[in-house]
Image: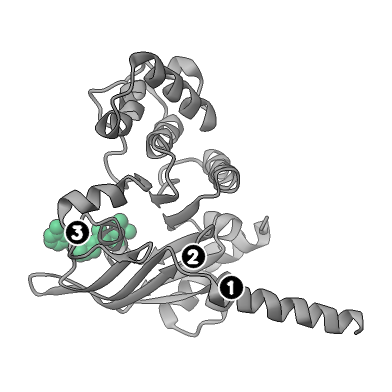
Amino acid sequence: MGRADNDEFDAAREMSARNRREPIISVRGVINRFGQQIVHDGVDLDVYPGEVLGIVGGSGSGKSVLLRTMLGLHRPNDGQVFVEGKDITKMPENELLAVKRRYGVTFQHGALFSSLSVAENVQLPIREYFDASPETLAKLTELRLRMVGLPLDAGPKLPSQLSGGMVKRAALARALALDPALLFLDEPTAGLDPISAAAFDDLVLYLQRGLHLTVVMITHDLDTIVKTCDRVAVLVDRKMVVDTLDGIMRNQHPWIQEYFHGPRARAAQTAGSTR
Ligand SMILES: Nc1ncnc2c1ncn2[C@@H]1O[C@H](COP(=O)(O)OP(=O)(O)OP(=O)(O)O)[C@@H](O)[C@H]1O
Ligand SMILES: [Mg+2]
């Protein structure tokens, strides 16, 4: 067999391995309505273990509502969400607790409790599930702060005493408190200057690789998408279009064309991909 044959063989084997992989999350036919407003009308989405999936869509297209649906925080009007094979949409709250223990999340609004110190914020999820001693809590907090690149003296500070970028890192430290398999980020770089945003992208990639995380990230930041995402899911017309970035770039849907080929998109792509 020549080299080309070998390559073809490898490619075919990789593809079949990919096809055999079970998704860690499967969204099927999800419908969400608020009164007369239909936000999702049959959304399908698979998230595979170890990938970084970016979710994109216009403001108000339902990205955050979809995230809450995948987290079991919002029950959809119809459809299913399977997390590690189990449908969470009709799961009783006590069973959902075990699912929630498996993921970490940073929300778009209200990243941290403003009346608690950074350390107390990080410790909150740990206290919820474990009866840890103060020494263990202190050690775990230190570890998490180091992981996200925060100085240890940030621990006793209140969120209002931190910069915007530090608040994002502290929220990430809290999301990682329980060693999650899955990390959900809703607009993690919004409001950061381009340099801080790029540093945050690097941090997410570093943690994702080091901790073997599966990451679902809502973002409007094209630089972040180009740099970090394996696949991109676009919410358009109340449904989901999912593909690799290259595939999405070739998609003819007018909103997708505008988003990925406008002047801002061209600047992001010129800056290049690191994946
Ligand atoms: N609890 C709720 N009650 C009523 N309407 C809601 C509720 N939550 C969300 N909506 C509506 O659902 C739509 C989608 O909201 P969502 O927050 O998911 O948008 P988004 O895509 O995250 O937008 P953005 O990019 O601005 O964050 C919006 O029109 C919003 O007003
Ligand atoms: Mg949102």
* Circle 3 residue: 74
106 vs 147, left or right, is left
Q: What is the distance, in whole Å, between disc 3 and disc 2 at their CAs?
A: 22 Å
Crowd rating for badge 3 (residues with CA inside 10 Å; few <14, some 14–19, many 20+): some
The amino acid pointed to by label 3 is: His
Q: Ligand 1: does it lie within 8 Å of the C-beta at label 1? A: no
Q: Residue 48, labelled with which disc?
A: 2
Task: Locate residue 197, reporting x and y percent.
Answer: 52, 43
Which dot, 3 or 1, sits closer to the camera?
Answer: 1
**Where on the picture, by quarter, is residue 265?**
bottom right
The structure residue drawn at horizontal position 27% and vertical position 39%, both measured from the top left corner, is: 110
Q: Ligand 1: does it lie within 8 Å of the C-beta at label 3? A: yes
Which dot, 3 or 2, sits closer to the camera?
Answer: 2
Quadrant holding the N terminus = bottom right
Q: Given contact means CB atoms under 8 Å apart, are the residues at marks 1 and 2 in contact?
A: yes
The kind of secondary structure element at disc 1 is helix
The structure residue drawn at horizontal position 55% and vertical position 60%, both measured from the top left corner, is: 229
Task: Locate residue 24, reporting x and y percent.
Answer: 43, 63
Crowd rating for badge 1 (residues with CA inside 10 Å; few <14, some 14–19, many 20+): few
Q: 126 or 265, which is in the foreground?
A: 126
Label 1 or label 2, whichever comes before in sequence order: 1
